[in-house]
Image: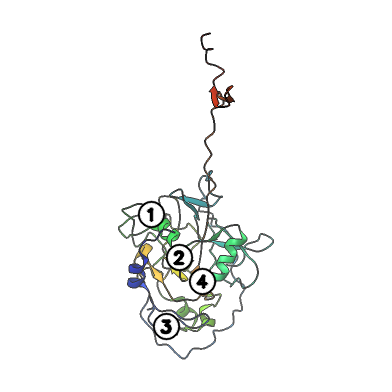
């Protein structure tokens, strides 16, 4: 695997995070002014069923991508395919799993499609299993970076270019949804951070592809903002920022959250999958040329349309 020199990026933008199942460390600053934090408490039970998951009618998938990648994926530099949209998950009967609930051990499969709320509340371990269930694999950190920044120099800082457009991606939600749910108090325990109601607060997670300008030249959407995205490598990493922040842990494509274990999940954690492209069409011998052997046993190429040699 090619490396991009992640030692520098990780050193600059890494922030300490909680161990699996525990609260994040305080080094990871909130995206809004810090309110008064009470002693951790169990979040109020979720009494309402999650909102129905319906495709957004205003988002078009665009022309079908025929070629070396499966439907819903884009080819990057001829080397790998990546989901064009943040992943949703499907149950064994092919129905959409609620993106507001953890997948646990339900054996869901990943899918890439526009106009649906992407899956959050998922761990790296679960995301990798969902990708494998659909015949793909969780993207490596290098693949994710190459898809976001571009693999050729000069690289992009953002999916759409080098100059930030604050309105291009879903990164500027006003206020923390936990403060809305708990009357201004901000809880940081694992139960509160996995409350199914968080991403149902208005203006949080957007359906895939809703931000038209947040797209790479290859047609890969929402790599910055909306949800953090798990990648695999020397350590589990969460890339790209989310709807509350795309600056604290790095800028744009260089946003990196470190030190969460592979079993960690909360309302910010999403993913997308990668796969190996189909081989290019092999070169074949032109139809007008036949291969024969002469009397000495060497191969010769005879064109039936060519004139016979002189006697």
User: Which residue lies under the disc numbered 3?
Assistant: 25
User: Which residue lies under the disc numbered 4?
Assistant: 199
- For marks 2 and 1 on the same chain, the one whose residue lies earlier in the sequence: 1
Circle 3: is it few (<14), some (14-19), or many (20+) Cα within 10 Å? some
Mark in front: 1 vs 3: 1
How far separated are the C-alphas under marks 2 and 1? 20 Å
- For marks 4 and 1 on the same chain, the one whose residue lies earlier in the sequence: 1
- For marks 2 and 4 on the same chain, the one whose residue lies earlier in the sequence: 4
Mark in front: 2 vs 4: 2
Q: Secondary structure at mark 3?
A: loop
Quick one: 113 or 265, which is closer to the camera? 265
Q: Residue 61 location, x and y as percent?
A: 52, 50
Mark in front: 3 vs 2: 3
How far separated are the C-alphas under marks 1 and 3? 32 Å
Circle 4: is it few (<14), some (14-19), or many (20+) Cα within 10 Å? many
Residue 90 visible, this orientation:
yes
Mark in front: 2 vs 1: 1
How far separated are the C-alphas under marks 4 and 1? 30 Å
Contact between marks 2 and 4 (CB within 8 A): the answer is no
User: Which residue lies under the disc numbered 2?
Assistant: 226
Judge whether 164 appears above or below 199 on screen: above
User: Which residue lies under the disc numbered 1?
Assistant: 150
Contact between marks 1 and 3 (CB within 8 A): the answer is no
Contact between marks 3 and 2 (CB within 8 A): the answer is no
Residue 53 visible, this orientation:
no
């Amino acid at each position: 695997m090619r490396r991009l020199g992640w030692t520098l990026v990780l050193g600059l933008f890494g922030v300490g995070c909680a161990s699996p199942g525990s609260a994040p460390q305080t080094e990871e600053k909130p995206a809004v002014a810090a309110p008064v934090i009470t002693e951790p408490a169990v979040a109020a039970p979720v009494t309402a069923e999650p909102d129905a998951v319906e495709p957004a009618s205003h988002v078009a998938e665009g022309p079908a991508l025929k070629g070396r990648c499966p439907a819903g994926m884009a080819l990057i530099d001829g080397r790998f395919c990546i989901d064009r949209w943040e992943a949703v998950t499907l149950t064994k009967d092919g129905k959409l799993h609620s993106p507001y609930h953890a997948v646990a051990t339900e054996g869901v499969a990943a899918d890439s499609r526009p106009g649906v709320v992407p899956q959050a509340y998922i761990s790296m371990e679960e995301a990798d299993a969902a990708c494998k269930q659909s015949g793909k694999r969780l993207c490596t950190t290098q693949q994710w970076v190459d898809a976001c920044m571009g693999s050729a120099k000069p690289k992009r800082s953002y999916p759409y270019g080098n100059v930030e457009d604050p309105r291009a991606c879903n990164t500027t939600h006003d206020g923390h949804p936990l403060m809305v749910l708990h009357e201004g108090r901000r809880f940081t325990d694992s139960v509160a951070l996995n409350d199914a109601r968080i991403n149902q607060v208005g203006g949080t997670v957007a359906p895939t592809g809703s931000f038209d300008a947040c797209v790479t030249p290859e047609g890969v959407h929402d790599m910055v903002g909306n949800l953090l995205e798990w990648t695999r490598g020397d350590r589990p990493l969460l890339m790209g920022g989310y709807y509350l922040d795309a600056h604290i842990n790095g800028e744009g494509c260089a946003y990196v959250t470190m030190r969460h274990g592979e079993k960690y999940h909360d309302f910010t954690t999403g993913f997308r999958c990668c796969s190996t492209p189909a081989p290019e069409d092999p070169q074949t011998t032109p139809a007008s040329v036949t291969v024969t052997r002469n009397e000495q046993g060497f191969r010769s190429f005879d064109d039936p349309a060519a004139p016979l040699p002189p006697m």
